[in-house]
Amino acid sequence: MASVARYQGLVERLEREAQQAPGRYKFKLALLAGLGFAVLGGTVLLALGMSAGLVLALLAISPILLLKLLKVIWIPVAFGWFVLKALWVKFEPPSGYVLGPNEAPELRAEIERLRAQTGAPPLKQILIDPNLNAGAASVPRALGLFGHTHYLVLGLPLMQLLSREQFAAVVAHEFGHFGGGHGRFAGWIYRVRASWNRFLGELSQRRSRMGAVFLRFFNWYAPYFDAYSFVLARAQEYDADATAARVTGAPTMAQALQRVGLGSVRLQRDFWAGVERSVETQPRPPQALYRDMAGSFAGAGADDAMRLQELLDEQPGLDDTHPTLAQRLQALGQAPAAVPAPTRSAAEALLGPLRETLEERFSREWREHVAETWQQRHQALGQDHARLAELEARADTLAGAELGEYAVLVDRLRPDADAVPLYRAALAARPDDALVLARLGAQLVDRQDAEGVGLLERAIELDPDLTEQGLQVLMQHHHRVGDEAAFEAAAKRLRALYQRRDGALLAREEVDPKKDRLLEHDLDAEALRIATAGLQASGKVKQAWIVRKEIAGDDSGIPHYLVLLALRGVAWTEGGMLQKVLDGLELPGSIVALHESSHRALAKRIKAMPGTLVYTRA
């Protein structure tokens, strides 16, 4: 779809249509949903049908002719196979700790009670993960053509935050998405929407030519289906809330919504911000993160009233199908009110001994995940603080690049300080310092000062490496001030950047003997020594040539090498032998290995370039 404005206009029109003519709206939505399946299935059936038709036609004409044209008949069959291969996307079930059959019996009993009351389908598994969230996950079988497998994902922090009754309301809401709160059609659309989103995510990561063909179609199709189903998806959130209100009571659901909203804000602004600050003073990450997290939920926050009002003042947008907190409370007929922390959390009431086990497990997994980065950042921050102290000791004599360095360090290490005057002083000394321009621009647009827009644009012009982050800041600013035209222009530039990067990634995985621009490898003596040692160690290479391939639109700075190989010995598959060589080959960039017998035209070009032969087996 061409623009955010067009998408918004379509959604608004469909909302009116859904209210005035719900039957017509649902019929059009069903047709659009069916179109996606028809394209996928129809392409495969067409290819196979062409083969069957050719066989029948040739049999009717002459069996001998059928034998002569057998290779022609296999062309559409092969095409159908390539289509199936391109579209064969395996949907993985959600991740998390799988609740064993004998674990947390009270939790299982509570979930089964709520499932029965909401009319939700049986669950394949109950999973617990480390996020402040809950989800009804339906994993499609063949994109939903053969039904779905249902999972319930519960976040341990969610259970630590809510009372047992509030937690039951959230679970009932999630069960409402399985179809218990809305009709079969709405439940089907909800699952199809989720399936298409996951399918497109998987397909966009594929680098096959056939997958790219379908990706182009779905890049056109997805925004329209998303807009049509967006209206129903938002209505489903209200239906799921109504299901929870019917099962647990509207006041309880309202309490859960407010508590989750405030808990998310406190987690981001207080808890994680505190963990982030502790990097400066602690060389190792906290030991009991999730136990500490539970403690942070136990009391009332000093800013809860102000933060609740911020949540109530939020405006509905198109980036989330969930209505705002104010809209959901109004639909429930409930007024906003302070919700005290529970005397006993749902985690304490329902998990039993498993609660401490999960807190320790998730804390350990988090520590292992961040340990190396944590230590590096702790050391770097120590060096930054030492450098800041050094610069401050001679603040009156700073000049040139040191003014910018000083401003950046103050901005990063002292969040309560106003770094804008320091950035302005640094910019006066060096007007074309891209980093200072970007940092000052970000500070100003955060204050809704339009001057920052020009500074960010200038920074992007001076340093293309700042493009992605600069455009993201500009998009947030334009969205915040309501300038949809400027927002769409920045979004278009960001999409173009991502498309160039996708094209560069695809170019690294494919070879075109006619169009690829080949360059000298430019490897130094040490890099060549390491590469040839790897080629020799494989024992499979007779000769090897290395060139660099120019990647158009690539801004990574990482070189890409084509390694042409003449192999010795016999292997069951050429790919397997090439992979064995690649496993032992080290080059300072990405690599594609080619066998000379399979790429004769490209091999001829590579061999003709001087200095490309880097290895010959003795």
Image (cartoon, rainbow, N blue to C red):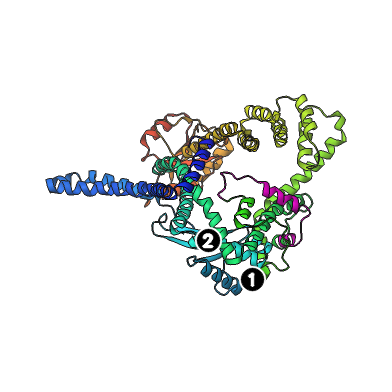
Q: Quadrant of the C terminus?
A: top left
With 213 as the anchor, is 561 left or right in this view?
right
Identify the residue at horizontal 21%, vertical 47% (top origin): 53
Q: How far across and how far down the image is residue 377, in percent?
A: 72, 47
> Which tag, 2 or 1, sits closer to the chain's start?
2
Label 1 Cα crowd, 10 Å radius (few <14 / some 14-19 / many 20+): some
Point out the stretch of residues depicted in magenta. 293-321
Q: Nearer the viewer, residue 358 or 481?
A: 481
Camera-nearest label, 2 or 1: 2
* Distance between mark 2 and mark 1 Cα atoms: 21 Å
Residue 250's place in the image compared with 597, above or below, is below
Q: Name the residue under label 1.
A: 350
Indicate the amino acid at tag 2.
Gly
Q: Looking at the rendered structure, which numbered label has been put on residue 606?
A: none
Identify the residue at horizontal 43%, vertical 52% (top origin): 89
Indicate the amino acid at tag 1.
Leu
Instruction: State the image quarter where residue 173 is shown.
Output: bottom right
Identify the residue at horizontal 87%, vertical 30% (top origin): 396
Instruction: State the image quarter where residue 524 is shown.
Output: top right
Instruction: State the image quarter where residue 371 is shown.
Output: bottom right
Q: Is residue 317 visible?
A: yes
- How many numbered discs? 2
Q: Does the magenta stretch include residue 240?
A: no
With 196 as the anchor, is 158 left or right in this view?
right
SS category of the residue bearing label 1: helix
Q: How far across and how far down the image is residue 135, in percent?
A: 56, 59
Residue 295's place in the image compared with 469, above or below, is below
